[in-house]
Image (spheres, helix red, strand yellow):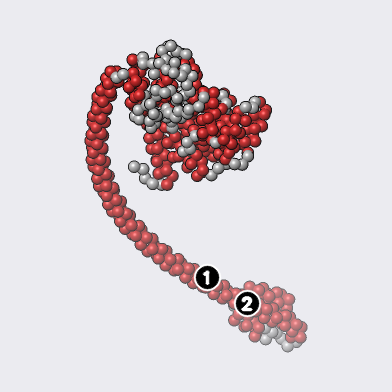
Amino acid sequence: MAEHLSGSLRRLIAKSDDPAQLDYVIHHLGTDVPANLRPKVTHLTEELRTEISVRKLVLDVDARMRDVDARKRAITAAEDARKRAITAAEDARTRTITAAVLAEDARTRAIQTQLDRAAALRAAEVHAFSTTLQSAGAAVQSEVQSVQMLQTRLEAEAALRDRRGNWRELLKSSAAALEARLYDKDRDDRLQAISAVVVRRVPAQGSLIQLLGDRDVEVRKAAHEALVFLARGTDFGPAADADRGDRLRAADRWEAWWAEQDNNPRRDVNSAHPLGTAPAAPPLAVGAPDRPATPREDKVMTFVLKAVGPEAGRLGAELAGTEGEQRTALITDFRVRKGGVYSDALVAAVLLVAADQRGPIREALAERLARMTPATLRARLGDEEAEYRRAATRALASRADRAAVPWLIPLLDDTEPAVAQAAHAALKSLTNQDLGPAPEADRADRVLSMAAWLGWWKQETQVASGAPGN
C-alpha cells in the first residue's frame, strides 16, 4: 500500500510543473498517516520531500533559463531592429548621395556639352579663317611664282639674246680672240667659247688642254669632249670622276700628242712645253685652272709638293715607290703615327700612285681623320685639297653622327666629282635616304638635289624638336 502510494506521488512530482502544487504536497505529506504507521513511512516521506525539492529547483532553473532566453530574444530583436534602422538610414543616405552625384554628373555633362559646342564652334571658325588665309596665301604664292617665272623667263630671254649676240661675235672673232675667251671669268662664256672653237675648228688644243684643270666640272667636261672631237676620236682622258693628279697626267698625254700635230701653231716655238707655259696663252682669270711652270715629268710631283710640303711629299713619294708587303707595312705605319705630316703624306701618295692602287691609301687616310673631333672634321670638309674633303666625308659617315648631314650637303656641288659622290654616299649612309644627285648629274640637277636634302633635313629637325612644320 505505501509503495503503491509512493509510486503515484513520484509520478505526480515528475509530471508537475506547478511549484505551488509541489509546495502543497510537501506541507500535507504524511499528515493523514496513522500514528502507528508513521515510523514506517518517515523515510519514504523524507525521500519524497527531497525529490519535491529537487523538482522545484529544476522548475526554478527552467524558469530562470526561459527568462534568460526571453531576454536574449528581446535583446536580439532590439539589436536586429537597431541594425535594420541603421541600414535603412544608411540606404536612405546613400540614395540621397547617389541622387546628388547623378545630379552633379548631369550638370557636369551639360556644362561639358556646352564647352564642346563652344570649342567646336571656335575650331570651325579657326579652320575657316585658316582656310581663308591659306587660300589667300596660295593665291599670293601663285602670283609670286607667276611673277618669278615671268622674271626668270625675261632673264632667260635676255641671257639668250646676249648669248646669241656673244655667239655671233665669237663666230666672227679672230682665232686669237676666240682662244682668249677660253679664259673668261664667266664659266658660261668659257663654255660658249669651247663650243665656238669646235664649230670653227680653231687649233686651240693647247688652251683646251689648260681647261682640263678648270675648277668648274662642266668646263672640264666640255674641254675634254672638244679635244676628243678635234682629235677625231683620239682620247687621252681624263675620266669624268678623275682627281687633279689624274687630270694632270691626262693633260700631259694630250700635250705630248699636241706637240706632234702639224696644225699646232706653236709647234716650232716649244713642241714640248708643259701644261700652262705656252707663250701665247693669256693670263689665267679667276675660276680658270692653275698652270705650274715645271718640266712635264715633274709636273705631278711639283703639284704634290705645293699641296702638302717637302717633308710630306718625300714621305708620300717613298710610299708610292713601294710595292706589295712593303707598301702595306708603310700604309699601316702612316695610319697610326702621330703628326699631321703623315696625313699629308697619305694625300701625296694618293696623288702619285695609279688610280687602281689608291683604295688602301684612301682608307688609311679616312681612318686617321675618323679619330679627330667633329669640329676638325668639319674644317677638313672645306680643305683646299680634295683628298682631305673626300676622306673627311668617309670619316663622318663611319661615325654615324647625323649632326654631320648639314655639313655634307654643300659638298654635293663640289668641284671634284669624287668628293661630290663621296658626300652623296655619306648622306645615304647617315640617313637611309637617297635624294640624289646621280653621278652624271649636271650642276642644275646637283643644286636641285641640295635643295631636296636641305628641305628633308629641316623637316627632320622640326620633327625631332617637336616644332610644327611649315
The part of the image, by quadrant, that contains residue 353 is top right
Q: Is residue 228 above or below residue 405?
A: above
Task: Give SS at disc 1.
Answer: helix
Pointer 2 local density, CA inside 10 Å: few below 14, some 14–19, many at least 20: few
The picture places residue 82, in percent across and down from the top left corner, at: 47, 70
Q: Is residue 461 left or right of residue 141?
A: right
In what quadrant of the picture does the C terminus appear? top left
Disc 1 versus disc 2: nearer the observer: 1
Q: Is residue 107 left or right of residue 391?
A: left
- Using the image as rendered, state which of residue 432 and residue 425 is in the foreground: 425
Task: Kindly identify the residue that appears in the image at 42 percent across and 32 percent down.
Answer: 413
Pointer 1 local density, CA inside 10 Å: few below 14, some 14–19, many at least 20: few
In what quadrant of the picture does the N terminus appear? bottom right
Q: Which residue is mark 1?
A: 76
Q: Is residue 267 above or below residue 72?
A: above
Asked if residue 321 shows in the view, the reply is yes
- Whether label 1 touches label 2, CB < 8 Å: no
Q: Is residue 226 left or right of residue 57?
A: left
The part of the image, by quadrant, that contains residue 328 is top right
Asked if residue 32 shows in the view, the reply is no
- Using the image as rendered, state which of residue 63 and residue 17 is in the foreground: 63
Furthest-right residue in this view: 40
Question: Which label number is shown at residue 61?
Answer: 2
The picture places residue 345, in percent across and down from the top left corner, at: 58, 34
Task: Kindly identify the residue that appears in the image at 65 percent across and 32 percent down.
Answer: 330
Amino acid type, callout 1: Thr
Question: Which label number is shown at residue 273?
Answer: none
Amino acid type, callout 2: Val
